[in-house]
Image (spheres, helix red, strand yellow):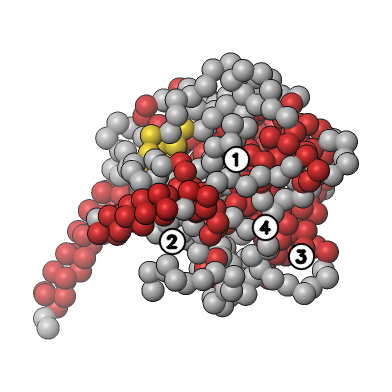
């Protein structure tokens, strides 16, 4: 194998990666899936606290809330016409106002929890509960479950 | 197709030659215990039994939420392989609902699947599960429903395919499938486990969706709660025994928390028709949910279950 062909391989590999990144960037369906995965990962440690499996930690709660807040701002931009499919329910496009309201409900609950800045599990439960409840409410109308 | 014609033949012969076999059998006044129906206790039974999930009138084509779950005017459609079932009005409206029914008529409907005029109900109404409830619980439930808003209007009748359209045939079906015995036999005296069994096998009627049915539409109790095709839509209903691939790793606490919050241990949310069920379960007590979890964890995994003849099984 010559240096020249190795270089060509490298170039090819680079070109493919760049293209895939570009495709990913143009694929809102993929992006919103990733976004939601991130939300779920952020929900896990907080959920474990609510369940009593993990000790309460105020900083972790705030970090997760920050992740939720960012996601709630972005989600509405990731459902352009033509990006239907995946676990996104057709209702998102049939009832965009309802979908926007569901995101707003989530966003409001997040803001309230951030402001409350709970320092104990008992303080967290009543403000984090509605944040989680908003996930469920929105999924109920705007997500299709895949096996 | 061959199965269907065989079924039609069998049903026709049996209905003609043994009409008495299909006659409804009902409870009498003396079967009702001396019990003052308690609407407060009845509310717990109402949520455990999931009445609202089918009988609450849909709002703008979507399932009812919040207070609308207490408006039991019916109207939900269930598209099943047997045809379309239209859920009736069970609000306390005197003409269109059940307001005019006696307590005995209500108990017979719930536990014997018989209407006040003596007709069989289709088992889409899960009386085969409700039959396992204590009569006093059914009486409390009635007292609670009596306090809900009366709703006028009745949905159209069911639209079923032949031979399921022959109501009388259900009498035979009941002889085979309507039983009050517990599905999972146990000698355990563990009160939590028994409370869970009572909720799951009775009012909760979990088996109606989570247990597969045989070709006559009866539950295959040997595969109790072991998952089934979704009769009202696409996909399947998961196996919730300890062997189930989705829930085998769940602890009893995970199940309890799921029923309370709607979140799986992986922090995904409850989906599909289970959303309404979980919301009902969230209205029970923590002890109730823990009892349900204890029972589910106790189900013997993939053990051939007794209590059913296999004369009519596909195997």
Residue B9 in sight: yes
In percent of width and height, residue A58 lies at: 75, 49
In terms of secondary structure, where does tag 2 sit?
loop
Q: Is residue A127 left or right of residue A138?
A: right
Q: Position of residue B243 (x, y in %)?
A: 55, 72
Q: Nearer the viewer, residue B158 or B176?
A: B176
Q: Which label sits in the foreground, 2 or 4?
A: 4
Question: In the image shown, does B177 or A70 lie closer to the viewer?
Answer: B177
Residue named by callout 4: B180
* Rendered residue at 55%/46% (across/down): B23
Q: Which residue position holds label 3?
A: B193
Q: Earlier in the sequence, mark 3 or mark 4?
A: 4
> Where, quadrant-wise, is the C terminus of chain B in this rendering?
bottom left
Disc 2/disc 1 C-alpha distance (Å): 23 Å
Q: Chain of mark 4?
A: B
| Chain ID of residue with mark 2 | B
Q: CA distance from mark 2 to mark 3?
A: 28 Å
């Amino acid at each position: 194998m010559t240096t020249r062909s190795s270089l060509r391989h490298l170039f090819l590999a680079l070109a493919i990666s760049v293209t895939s990144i570009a495709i990913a960037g143009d694929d809102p369906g993929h992006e919103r899936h990733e976004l939601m995965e991130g939300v779920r990962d952020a929900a896990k440690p907080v959920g474990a606290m609510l369940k009593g499996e993990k000790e309460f930690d105020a900083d972790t709660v705030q970090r997760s809330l920050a992740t939720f807040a960012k996601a709630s701002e972005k989600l509405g931009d990731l459902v352009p016409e033509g990006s239907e499919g995946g676990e996104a329910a057709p209702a998102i496009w049939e009832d965009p106002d309802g979908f926007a309201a569901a995101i707003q409900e989530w966003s409001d609950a997040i803001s309230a929890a951030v402001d409350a800045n709970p320092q104990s599990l008992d303080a967290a439960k009543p403000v984090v509960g509605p944040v989680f409840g908003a996930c469920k409410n929105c999924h109920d109308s705007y997500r299709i479950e895949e096996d | 197709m061959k199965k269907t014609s065989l079924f039609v033949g069998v049903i026709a012969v049996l209905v003609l030659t043994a009409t008495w076999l299909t006659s409804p059998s009902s409870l009498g006044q003396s079967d009702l215990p001396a019990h003052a129906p308690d609407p407060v206790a009845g509310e717990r039974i109402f949520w455990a039994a999931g009445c609202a999930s089918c009988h609450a009138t849909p709002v703008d084509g979507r399932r009812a939420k919040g207070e609308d779950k207490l408006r039991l005017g019916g109207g939900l459609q269930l598209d099943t392989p047997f045809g379309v079932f239209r859920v009736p009005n069970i609000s306390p409206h005197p003409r269109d609902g059940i307001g005019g029914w006696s307590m005995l008529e209500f108990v017979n409907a719930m536990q014997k699947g018989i209407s006040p005029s003596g007709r069989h109900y289709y088992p889409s109404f899960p009386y085969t599960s409700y039959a396992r409830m204590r009569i006093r619980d059914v009486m409390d439930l009635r007292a609670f429903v009596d306090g809900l808003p009366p709703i006028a209007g009745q949905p159209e009748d069911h639209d079923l395919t032949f031979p399921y359209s022959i109501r009388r045939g259900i009498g035979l079906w009941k002889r085979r499938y309507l039983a009050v015995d517990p599905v999972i036999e146990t000698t355990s005296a563990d009160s939590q486990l028994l409370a869970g069994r009572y909720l799951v096998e009775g009012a909760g009627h979990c088996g109606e969706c989570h247990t597969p049915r045989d070709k006559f539409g009866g539950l295959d109790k040997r595969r109790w709660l072991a998952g089934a095709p979704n009769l009202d839509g696409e996909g399947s209903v998961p196996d919730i025994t300890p062997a189930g691939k989705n829930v085998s790793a769940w602890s009893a606490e995970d199940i309890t928390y799921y029923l309370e919050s709607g979140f799986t241990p992986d922090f995904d949310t409850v989906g599909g028709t289970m959303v309404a069920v979980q919301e009902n379960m969230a209205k029970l007590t923590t002890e109730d949910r823990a009892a349900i979890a204890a029972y589910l964890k106790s189900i013997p995994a993939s053990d051939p279950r007794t209590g059913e003849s296999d004369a009519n099984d596909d195997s």
